[in-house]
C-alpha cells in the first residue's frame, strides 16, 4: 500500500494532490526549485526537498534528481500531476525500475498514446473513428501534397509527438503547404526533439469534447462523462464544462463506449482522457488520449461526486474501480475558468511579478484550486496558470450565475489576468445558448466585446484600474504608441489603484 507520495510538480496541481494525500492519511513530499522556495505547496507538504535551479530543465524536468529524491526520502510512489514529466515514458520506466509506484499509465502505454501515428493505427484496429488524414508519418513535402489533394484543403500539419496545441500549422493551399512544411518540421524538432509530421484534415467550426476515463489493473474500464472544452485560444483551453450542452444521454453512452474502447486499445491504466472533435452534424472523431490527470478534472469531480486523485491512487495501489458504468449519473452542471496571468490585449502574453494582494471567491458551489497568496510571485519560468475557478449548479444557468459572481469577487493585484475576458464570454448570448466552437473568440469578436464592456464599466463605476486597462487595450488595438503625457496618465491611474 502507498504510504508516501512524492509529487513531481508545483503550483496548484501539487497542492491538489497534497489535499487528497492528507485526506487519505498518506504522507506527501514536495519538490521545489530555487524559484519556488516560498511556494504554497512547499509549506503544505509533509516534507519538501530542493531539486535545482529555476529553469525547468534543472528542476521539474530533471528526471534523475526527482527519482533520487524519491528514493532517498523513502517515498513509495510518485504522482506527476500534469505538464512537466506527466507524459514522459522514460520517467515512468525509471520509476518502475527503482520500484517506485508511478501514479499513471505504464511507460509502454504512454509511448503508444504519445505517438499519434501508432495511436491512430490502434484506434483503426479498435474501430474508433479518427480524423481523415495520412495513415502514417509524412517525411517529404511531395507526399504531404498528395495527401492534401486527396482529402482537400485546408489541412493541418501536426507534429507526431506534439501536444497542448504546439506543433500545429494550418495551411490553406499548395503554396502554403510548401512554405510551412519545413518550418513545422523544425518547430517540432525544437519543441519535442523529433521532427516527424503527419497531415490531417482541418475541420471548421468544431467542438472539442473529451471523455474522462479510468481503467484499473484488472481490466475494468469506465468513462466518467464528457467535458466541453471548445472555448480556446491557440489550441489552449480557457473554459471547460460538464456536461456538454450538445451531448444527450444516448450520445454520452455511445461516444463514452468509444472512449473506453480507445483506452483498452492502448492497454491504458489509471485516469486519462480521450479527446474528440465533434462536427456540426454530430459526428465524433477521436484525436488523442491524454495520459495524465487533466487541468479541467474538477468539473468532472463536481458532477460525479468523485475524487479523481483518490481514484488514481487506489488504481495505482492495485484496487479495482469500486463502481460500474451503470452506477454513474451526471449531477448538475460545472464550469471551470482557467485564471491565467496573461495580458489579454497583448496576444495573451504572460504577465509575471509579485502579487501584492488577492481575493479568492467562495460560497455555495464555488471551488478555487490555486497557489496564490498575498506576496507570492508569478514566475516567468513556468506556465501562466495561477488558479482554476470552478462553479457547480443544479443546472447550467445556476452554474453560470455562480461563475459570474465568483469572477466579480476574484481579483489579483500585481499581474494582468484573464478574469475580464471570462466575464465577457459568460454574458454573451452565444455562450448562454451553447453555440460553442474552437474558434469562438474570433467568430464572435470577443476581444472587441471585451473592450466595449470595459468602456461601459468605466463609464458606470469610474474605476481607475479599469480605465487604465481600457487605455492599454486601445493602444494595442490601434497599434498606437502612447506619448509621454498619456504614459504618465496611464501610470498614474495604475499607481492610484
Image: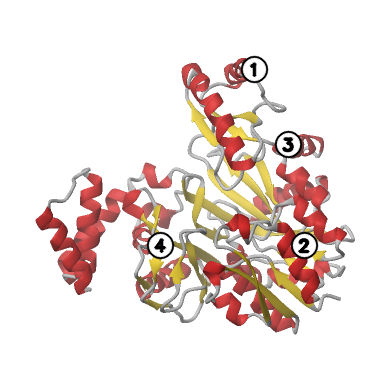
Q: Residues within 10 Å of mark 4 (few under 14, many from 20)?
A: some
Above or below — where is 15 with respect to 284?
below
Residue occupying image coordinates x 40% and y 62%: 352
Drawn side of residue 272 relative to residue 167, left or right: right
- Circle 3 residue: 120
Q: Along the polypeptide, which appears first: circle 1 or circle 3?
A: 3
- Circle 1 residue: 143
Viewer-side label of 1, 2: 1
Q: Mark 2 and mark 4: span between their CA atoms?
A: 44 Å
Q: Residue furthest right?
A: 218
Q: Mark 4 and mark 3: span between their CA atoms?
A: 39 Å
Q: Mark 2 and mark 3: span between their CA atoms?
A: 26 Å
- Circle 4 residue: 352
Q: Mark 4 and mark 1: span between their CA atoms?
A: 44 Å
Q: Position of residue 15 (x, y in %)?
A: 60, 74
Viewer-side label of 1, 3: 1
Q: Are marks 2 and 4 in contact (CB under 8 Å)?
A: no
Viewer-side label of 4, 1: 4
Q: Position of residue 291 (x, y in %)?
A: 71, 53
- Circle 2 residue: 325
Amino acid at each position: 500500500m502507498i504510504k508516501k507520495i512524492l509529487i513531481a510538480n508545483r503550483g496548484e496541481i501539487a497542492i491538489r494532490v497534497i489535499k487528497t494525500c492528507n485526506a487519505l492519511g498518506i504522507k506527501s513530499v514536495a519538490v521545489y526549485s530555487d524559484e519556488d522556495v516560498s511556494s504554497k505547496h512547499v509549506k503544505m507538504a509533509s516534507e519538501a526537498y530542493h531539486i535545482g535551479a529555476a529553469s525547468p530543465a534543472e528542476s521539474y524536468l530533471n528526471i534523475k534528481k526527482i527519482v533520487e529524491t524519491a528514493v532517498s526520502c523513502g517515498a513509495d510512489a510518485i504522482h506527476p500531476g500534469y505538464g512537466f514529466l506527466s507524459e514522459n515514458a522514460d520517467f515512468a520506466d525509471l520509476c518502475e525500475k527503482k520500484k517506485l509506484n508511478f501514479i499513471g499509465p505504464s511507460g509502454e502505454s504512454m509511448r503508444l498514446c504519445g505517438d499519434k501515428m501508432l495511436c491512430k493505427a490502434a484506434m483503426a484496429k479498435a474501430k474508433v473513428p479518427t480524423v481523415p488524414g495520412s495513415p502514417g508519418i509524412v517525411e517529404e513535402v511531395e507526399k504531404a501534397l498528395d495527401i492534401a489533394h486527396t482529402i482537400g484543403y485546408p489541412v493541418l500539419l501536426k507534429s507526431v509527438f506534439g501536444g497542448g496545441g504546439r506543433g500545429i500549422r494550418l495551411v490553406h493551399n499548395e503554396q502554403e503547404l510548401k512554405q510551412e512544411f519545413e518550418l513545422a518540421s523544425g518547430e517540432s524538432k525544437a519543441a519535442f526533439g523529433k521532427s516527424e509530421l503527419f497531415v490531417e484534415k482541418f475541420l471548421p467550426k468544431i467542438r472539442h469534447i473529451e471523455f474522462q476515463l479510468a481503467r484499473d489493473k484488472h481490466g475494468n474500464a469506465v468513462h466518467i462523462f464528457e467535458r466541453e472544452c471548445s472555448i480556446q485560444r491557440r489550441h489552449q483551453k480557457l473554459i471547460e464544462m460538464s456536461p456538454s450542452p450538445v451531448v444527450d444521454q444516448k450520445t454520452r453512452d455511445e461516444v463514452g463506449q468509444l472512449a473506453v474502447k480507445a483506452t483498452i486499445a492502448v492497454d491504458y491504466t489509471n485516469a486519462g482522457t480521450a479527446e474528440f472533435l465533434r462536427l456540426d452534424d454530430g459526428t465524433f472523431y477521436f484525436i488523442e488520449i491524454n495520459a495524465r490527470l487533466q487541468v479541467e478534472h474538477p468539473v468532472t469531480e463536481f458532477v460525479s461526486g468523485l475524487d479523481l486523485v483518490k481514484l488514481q491512487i487506489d488504481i495505482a495501489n492495485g484496487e479495482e474501480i469500486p463502481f460500474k458504468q451503470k452506477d454513474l449519473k451526471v449531477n448538475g452542471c460545472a464550469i471551470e475558468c482557467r485564471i491565467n496571468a496573461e495580458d489579454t490585449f497583448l496576444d495573451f502574453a504572460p504577465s509575471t511579478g509579485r502579487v501584492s494582494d488577492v481575493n479568492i471567491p467562495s460560497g455555495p458551489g464555488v471551488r478555487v484550486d490555486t497557489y496564490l497568496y498575498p506576496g507570492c510571485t508569478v514566475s516567468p519560468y513556468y506556465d501562466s496558470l495561477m488558479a482554476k475557478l470552478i462553479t457547480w449548479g443544479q443546472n447550467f444557468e445556476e452554474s453560470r450565475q455562480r461563475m459570474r459572481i465568483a469572477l466579480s469577487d476574484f481579483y489579483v493585484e500585481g499581474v494582468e489576468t484573464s478574469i475580464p475576458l471570462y466575464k465577457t464570454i459568460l454574458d454573451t448570448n452565444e455562450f448562454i445558448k451553447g453555440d460553442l466552437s474552437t474558434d469562438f473568440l474570433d467568430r464572435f469578436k470577443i476581444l472587441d466585446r471585451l473592450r466595449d464592456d470595459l468602456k461601459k464599466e468605466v463609464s458606470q463605476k469610474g474605476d481607475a484600474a479599469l480605465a487604465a486597462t481600457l487605455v492599454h487595450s486601445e493602444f494595442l488595438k490601434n497599434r498606437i504608441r502612447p506619448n509621454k503625457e498619456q504614459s504618465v496618465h496611464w501610470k498614474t491611474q495604475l499607481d492610484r489603484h
